[in-house]
Structure formats: structure tokens, C-alpha cells
Image: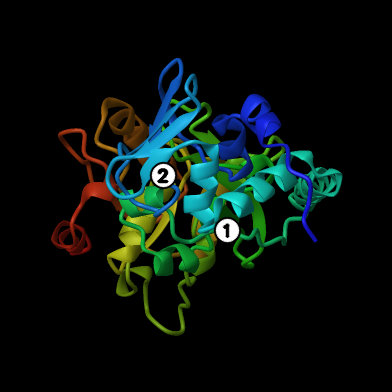
Amino acid sequence: MAIYLDIDKIRREDNINRLLDFYSIQLKQIESNHLSGCCPIHQGDNPNAFHVDLEKNLFNCFTHCGGGSIFDFVMKKEKLSFYQAASRIWNIFYSPSQRQSMKQENAKVKQELTLMNLRLKLQHHHCYLEKRNITPQLAQYFQMGFCQYGIMKNRIAIPVFDIQNRIVAYCGRAVQEGISPKYLFPKKFNKSYHLFNIQHITPHIPQASPSPQHQKPVFIVEGFFDCIHIVKMGFDAVALMGCSISQQQLTLLKDINRFYILMLDGDDAGEKATIKVSNKMAQFKLTFKTVYLIELKEPELLDYDFLEMTTRN
């Protein structure tokens, strides 16, 4: 059955920014009325390919898809005819049942985020993950991905597990520069009580080997992506989620009882933090060695040969 469509009303009242918000597309604002980013139509990875003019209500993909109005955007993104695209826009913004469904979905997601064992529905393939050299398979291994709903909307949601492999929180990384905060944690989550990726670290068993040094060492780094990169290279790693270490984190490391390689960022803050963290680890009688990075390097930028070299005693 045909539905009533007021095309003029859509042209007058709907803007492309509203449509981008519906599709959970986050672009970087480069001028007051100008946005840019990866193309959401063909899912490209060029951060400068897709441009939106908010004043003229137009878009353009300079590498593949071309441009046009909000009708053209929906036609290209969902492969629809003009009438089908107009109907889609009408249903999105003017259908009472659709608006109510969207409100219920957002409320449901926000409520479910309070449950620590919830697995969010995430997209393991995203241009930001590609930029950080994270494949969909690697993203699936860490159960991370692009989130479209709730408090993690338009962010890369990264789950933090406890040692029993239970999700205790999600951290959301902004996919566009200039978004604040860059890393969004739930208000009641205390990251100093946890170590990222601890669920994948096997504790040292004295009966299996005489000392922790006989097992593969565990790198201790600052950030999520440093840790993910090192794991991708075939090594064990945990992240402090910052450049300080707490009593609770030290206790977790003590319980795992492995040989550790402390390797924080190579900037001034990382160098100062390394001294403080290594002193605390020594006081806690952990078995470890310290690697200082130079020239402002981060662990995420290190190759396999360098990492392998650091594991040698």
C-alpha cells in the first residue's frame, strides 16, 4: 500500500546532519558548516574522502560515490530508488511508530549497559580500526568494535575484563580527533582496580616451571592500543589504562606471578612515570625489567624484532 509522502516537507525540515546522526555517522568538523571523514557509503578508509556542507545540505564522496542531497545519500547508502529513499526518510523522522521504536531502543541499551556481563553489538570492521592496523579478526578477539547506540555511541567500544573473564566496563575511544573526552569511561568505573587484557594472561604455576622467567614475559604498557599491538605481534601484554599503577593492580600482577617488562611511552610523562611505577613494582617484589623508549616512541609503533629483543635476558 502506498504511503503519503510530503517531499517538500522533507526538503524544508530535514537536514543531512540529522540523517548522519540517525545512521550514527561521526565526522570531523573542519569549518563551522563543513564536515569530513571516511565515506560511510562505501566504507572507505580515507579520512578526507567524504565531505558534508551543512549550509547547502549536500554531501560528496570524492573517491567513489559522488554526491548530492539527503535523498541521494539514502539512495546510495541503502541502494534504493528515489521513492524508496524518500519513504525511508519519512518513516525515520515522521512515523510515530519509528520514533517510539528509536526511543525504546536507546533506553534499552542504556539500561543494559549497567549489566556487567552484557556483550554489546559492535561492528568489528571500521575505518578507524583499519587506521590503527586492527583487523576485524583481531577486533573480534578483543570483543571490541564501533558502537552505534547508548553512551558509547559513535565510539570504538573496548571491553575491560576481570581475571574471571567477566566484563566489568566498556571504554569508548572517539573515532574523530577533537572529540572530548578522547577515552570515555563509565562514571562509576575505577580503572585503577583493573588491568586491560588480564583475562588472556595465564598465571605462573610453580609445578609447571621453576620460576616465572621460564614463561613468556608479560609487557606492561600504558594504553589499550599499545597492548593490542603487542598481542598482535605474538607476545603477552596488559595495559594500566594510564601512566600510574595502583595497589590493586600491583596485587593482580603479584597473583599472576609472571616475569614482566615495563615499557611505557617514550615521552617526558612516560619517562617520569616509568621511574615511579618501577619503584612501586620493586617494592612489591615483582620480577621485572624496565625498557625505556626514546624519541617519543610508543609501544604501538614497535616492530616484532624490537619486541623480541626486549624479551631476551
Residue 286 x/y as whole percent: 42, 54
User: Residue 239 at x, y = what percent?
Assistant: 44, 50
Q: How many marks?
A: 2
Examine the rendered structure and indicate whether residue 48 appears above or below residue 121. above
Residue 284 shows in this picture? yes
Q: Is residue 3 or residue 31 the one in the foreground?
A: 3
Identify residue for label 2. Answer: 223
Of residue 160 and residue 292, the one placed in the foreground of this image is 160
Q: Which residue is mark 1?
A: 122
Q: CA distance from mark 1 to mark 2?
A: 21 Å
Q: Of circles 1 and 2, which is in front?
A: 1
In this rendered view, identify the residue nearer to me: 253 or 28.
28
Write the residue at 62% across / 30% down: 11
Residue at image coords 66%, 31%: 8
Q: Identify which amino acid the numbered label 2 is placed on.
A: Gly
- Looking at the image, residue 109 sits to the left or right of residue 22; the answer is right
The mark that comes first in sequence, 1 or 2, is 1
Disc 1 residue type?
Leu
Q: Residue furthest top?
A: 32
Q: Say which mark, if any, is on residue 247.
A: none
Residue 124: x and y in percent read: 48, 61
Q: Which residue is painted at 63% across and 46% down in the image?
A: 86
